[in-house]
Amino acid sequence: MSVPLTLLGLLEREPSHGYDLKREYDAYFGRDRPLSFGQVYATLSRLARDGKVVAGGAEPGAGPDRKRYLITEAGVTEFETWLTEPVQPEPHLQTVLFTKVVLALMLGRPADSYLDTQRSAHLQRMRELTVLKRTGGMIDALLADHGLFHLEADLRWIDMTAARLDVLAQLVAAGSADTPLEGSR
Amino acid sequence: MTEEGRATAAGHGPGGCLLEARDLVRSYGQTPALRGASVSVAAGEILAVMGPSGSGKSTLLHCLAGILTPDSGQVWFDGQRIDAMGENERSALRRDRFGFVFQFGQLVPELTAEENVALPLLLGGTRRAQALTAARGWFGQLGLDGLEQRRSGELSGGQAQRVALARGLVAGPEILFADEPTGSLDSLTGEQVMNLLVAAVHEHGTTVILVTHEARVAAYADREIIVRDGLVTSLSANRAGS
């Protein structure tokens, strides 16, 4: 998650103070990891230095910083470019679990039990997210859904790998794991 | 932890639980479906039964519910051996103490929604007016107000499945057997059905055996078992009531 770009996005909607930016950021994007005030003001300072935002004059009132920040044209351009670019899809071809499975097969260890352990951990996390969905608000539900669909995708990979373990074990044992799968599935 | 080990906790049956299967073997002709499956379920627990297609999970559910009898092995419910009962006795048990929800609702098309919900009570001998009053009580709880007089062809998939859920719960079963209850629904509708199911069974203290191949549905359960090649693997520690 890019904190500077997210703050730019919040500022594109309307000029705001550091305190309000932190509050909004935490409500939508920082539920697990809220921003510190130091992080907010350091980020705003960098954005101001780079010409992406400008700080208005100090306003009277309580709090450490009553400056109102406005986004600049350069800031709008940077934010819109980021917003419209697709996120890099991450293929995750070399996950830790994949490494464990292949190593287990190479070493004659029980790869299926590693997969079961991982399946159990995934299901437990899915249970926690499901409770969060049932007891939380819409933002919690959307975030939990995102996690649930990713965990579900992992579980499908685990199921598919478990179903292929026998073939995979033979290929690993023969040192021919790169053999095309056609005919050996 | 093995399912055998879990069965030693205090509870209803000889194995210390509300429902227990021991070493179930069941074949269809020459094809084995269960090859020594054991499982125990605590009162009030929601247990997800997962596994690949053809692994034996539906056969296990049917044996636990007294729909099928195993070739060998035992099924205990509340201190009684279901597998040793005659068909009439098992039928009465299913009607009086168990509830069922299947993948496609299986509502009776000639009956209205409220008559479908009232069906288990009517079959059990409850008077019609009383059964229909009890049935109507479920419509509000499951978000079905105003649909009492509709027939199944006039209901959406999600509505029909909620009517089926009400029918499964109307007689106050001790165990609800749910076989892929959201399998025919889209994700959002399935989620609504599962939320309603969990809220209702928590309120009434109903035990649930939930067969599903979807991890997102299994995540509503307290714990899960996996059926593979007719055998049961227990993945998670017993979190019943958590």
Image (cartoon, coloured by chain):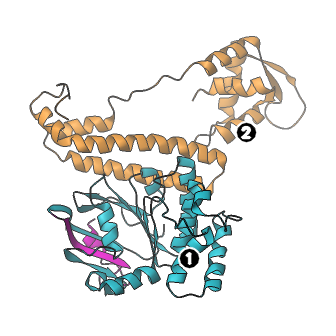
Chain colours: A orange, B cyan
The residue lying toward the viewer, choosing from B19 and B108, is B108
Q: Check disc 2 and give the amino acid type.
A: Arg
Q: Identify the element where label 1 is drawn.
A: loop
Circle 1 chain: B
Taking A29 as reference, is B15 above or below it?
Answer: below
Q: Check disc 1 and give the amino acid type.
A: Val
Q: Where is residue B58 in the image (x, y as percent from the top left)?
A: 33, 63
Residue indicated by mark 2: A23
Question: Quadrant where the N terminus of chain B lies?
Answer: bottom left
**Corner quadrant of residue B19:** bottom left
Answer with left or right where residue A64 lies relative to residue A131: right
Write the start and end of the magenta stretch as one range. B1-29
* Dots 2 and 1 on the same chain: no
The residue positioned 81% from the left and 37% from the top of the image is A63
The residue lying toward the viewer, choosing from A2 and B37, is B37
The residue lying toward the viewer, choosing from B178 and B126, is B126
